[in-house]
Structure formats: structure tokens, C-alpha cells
Image: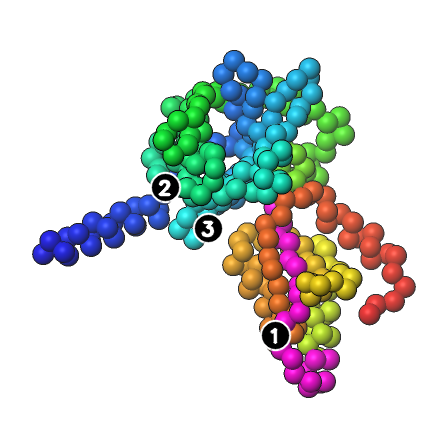
Amino acid sequence: MKLVLTFTIIALANLTFSQATFPDFLQGTWKMENKEIYEHWDKLDNKELKGISYRINDGQLFVSEYLDIIQKNNEIIYTAIVLDQNQKEGVEFKMTQTDSTFIFENAYHDFPKKIVYQKLSDTRIFVQVLDEKQKGYGYGMTKQCVVTTEQDTTISNPDYDMALAEKLGADDYGMKKYFLVILKTGTNTTAEKQLITESFRGHLDNINKLVKDGKLVVAGPLGKNENSYRGIFILNNINTIEEAQDLLQTDPAIKNSFLDYEIFNWYGSAALPEYLPVSDKIWKSNP
């Protein structure tokens, strides 16, 4: 009976963590107390926040860090890209505790090993950056109120087009989330010419279909390289990596394993699709 009870408790604990609250309260701009240092977070969807850390000096903004919090299956991952560290590679921290305190840990990183966001109220948080002995530093941050008047004072771009930004799904920085796909040589080494021809003809036809459906904004081949990379796609208006993977299986060359792929989250200009109408006016013949 004790054994059954123990497993039940463990199962309930795992279930509770898998349903952990996503820290979307971070959305917005936060200012460090007594310093001109800020974090700004945008909510891309229900499973991802994209952020930056920056300071303001003499009226100029200097970005120091790019941040991301994303839910992958039952895990919530915090990724930090510090511009002058780790060759600008992202360092991942896994969320290990939640409630009003969100703890992200990476036992293998030198420092920090733990990043903590404690929600004190709707407008105040306390952040700690710690080592394995719980030593480090902490600071309070206050959420900055956005004041909207007849003229929106939060808009610093005199050419800002709100209707266009909303149409393109742009965040405050004119950016949005895409999926970057690197196509590479697949595992199918058959010499069956008809299958090869049909697969790659279907590959080109599928590219045109995805463009018309608004799901693909960039496609093109890569030059010869030692990694067997063949080309790239940039997928648009896709919510999850699983949805992107399903979409790629509509390509006959991928489905028949003549092409394989690697896929990445990519954060780029929301204006990227705007080049497509022009691109349709400058070609003389289709492949």
C-alpha cells in the first residue's frame, strides 16, 4: 500500500509540474531599481516569450542580451544569449519550480547556474542570478506603465504604420517568429529515375503551393558544401515545431527521404513576406 501511495504522489507531482503556469506575466517592459537597465518581453503565443535586456545611456539604447522562454512538451526552457559571452551561443536553463517564483537551472553552466524570477505583485518582480551555493546577486524590477494618449508616446518611429504592422503580425520591434529549415541530402540512395524525377518535380510544385498558402516566404538552394546542405526554407504563420514538421511532410522529396532537414526557431523582420509580390514580377522563366 505504501508503494502504491508513493507512486501516486510522484505521478501527481509530475502532473502538477507538467501543468505549470507559464510566466506570461513578464510580458511588457521592466526597469531595474535605481538603474537605467531594462528587460522587455513580447508574448509570441501561449507557449513562448521573446525578450531583450538593454541599458539606456545618454538617450541611446544598448542591447546586452537576447532572451527566450518557450514551452517544449512538458518542459519550460529559458534561453539567454549574452552578446559578449559564449561566442553568442544561447545557454539553456530548465524551469524546475513554479508558483509565484519561477526557477530556471543549468547545473552544467559555470555561472549562473540558477536564474530566479519572483513575482511580488503585478508590477514588481525580484530577480536573482545565483551559483550552486546560492551566492550571486539580485535586484528588483518595476513594470513600466504604457501611457496611451491621443498621440501614442510609446511610438518613436515617425513612419510607423499600425495597420501594416498588425497585418504582418509584427511585435513592437517589427519582428515576428518564423521557422528556419535547412534542407540536406536524405538517406534514399535509389537509382530509380522516375521516382527521383517525380519527387523533385513535386518538391518544386509544393514550394509554389506553400507560397500561395502564405506558409513559405523564402526558398532557395545552397552552394556545394561539406555538410551536404542543399537549401533553405523560411516558414511563416506556423505556431509549433510539430505543425512545421507536418507541413514539411507534404514535400515529396522529403517524404521519400531524398531530402532531410534541420529546423530552428528564427526571429526576423515581419516585413519579410512583403518582397513576394515584387519577386513575381522579375522572373522570365520557371524551373
287 is higher (above) or lower (below) than 9: below
Name the kind of residue labelled 3 in the image: Lys
- Farthest residue, direction left: 1
- Badge 1: residue crowd in 10 Å (few <14, some 14–19, many ≥20): few
Q: Is residue 140 visible?
A: yes
Residue at image mark 1 = 187
Residue at image mark 3 = 72
139 is higher (above) or lower (below) than 19: above
Highlighted range, magenta = 177-197
Task: Please tell me which residue is depicted at 60% across the width and 26% down the height of the picture.
Answer: 54
Residue 184 position within the rendered picture, expressed as x and y whole percent measured from the top left: 66, 65
Name the kind of residue labelled 1 in the image: Thr
Secondary element under disc 1, as helix, strand or loop, is: loop
Distance in Å between CA atoms under marks 1 and 3? 28 Å
Locate residue 136: give its quadrant.
top left
* Mark 1 or 3, closer to the camera: 1
Residue 71 position within the rendered picture, expressed as x and y whole percent measured from the top left: 46, 47
Residue 88: in magenta span: no
Secondary element under disc 3, as helix, strand or loop, is: strand
* Quarter occupied by the N terminus: bottom left
* Mark 3 or 2, closer to the camera: 2
Residue 184: in magenta span: yes
Residue 11 position within the rendered picture, expressed as x and y whole percent measured from the top left: 25, 53
Q: Nearer the viewer, residue 83 or 239?
A: 83
Residue 218 position within the rendered picture, expressed as x and y whole percent measured from the top left: 72, 55
Residue at image mark 2 = 96
